Image: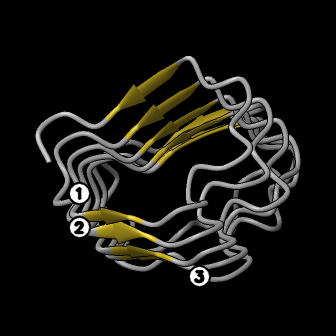
Amino acid sequence: CPSVCNCVGRGYSRVPLSLPRTITSLKLSHNSITNLRRHGFSMYSKLKELNVNNNNISKVPKKAFSSDHLQKLHLSNNKITYIESGTFTNKRRLKHLSLHNNQITDFKTGTFSDLPRLHVLELSSNQLRDIQPGALSNLTNLKTLRLDEN
């Protein structure tokens, strides 16, 4: 896989470390990944799109995504219950963030701050009960916010 790596449904239980470091798109959906680690994608610093939909991920730690180039991040259809405040800090190029169909109950202040180019934020089909003031601050270019079925 020169720039786009399609690792869909390959039975991975963790992020593979043996892929070319210059990849720009990584598709890891339909695997068995349960944990994302801090700096878990740091070796793939050119990533523009990451898809980890349909795994068993339960938590998204700070600094899980290191690429400053990340534009699309797909985390839907997992078991995410919690996202640390500051997880998406310095993702200034991120345009599309999909977190629908998880088990997220709340967002703390600062969870989505510092995402000036974010256009789409999908949070539907979670268990949202509380979005603290400031959790969605500074989303100046947000065009679509999906909160249905919460």
Which badge, 2 or 1, comes first in the chain's sequence? Answer: 2
The answer to whether residue 80 is left or right of residue 65 is left
Query: Marks 3/2: CA distance?
Result: 15 Å
Query: Marks 2/1: CA distance?
Result: 5 Å
**Three-letter amino acid code at the position of disc 3:** Arg
What's the residue at 77%, 62% (across, down)?
89
> Is disc 2 in contact with disc 1, using a CB cutoff of under 8 Å?
yes
What's the residue at 53%, 62% (across, down)?
133
Quarter of the N terminus within the rendering: top right
- Identify residue for label 1: 102
Image quadrant in which you'd find residue 47:
top right
**Three-letter amino acid code at the position of disc 1:** Asn
What's the residue at 50%, 73% (across, down)?
108
- Identify residue for label 2: 79
State the image coordinates of residue 5 (x, y, percent, origin top left): 61, 37
Secondary structure under badge 2?
A: loop
Q: 10 Å neighbourhood of mark 3: few (<14), some, or many (≥20)?
A: some
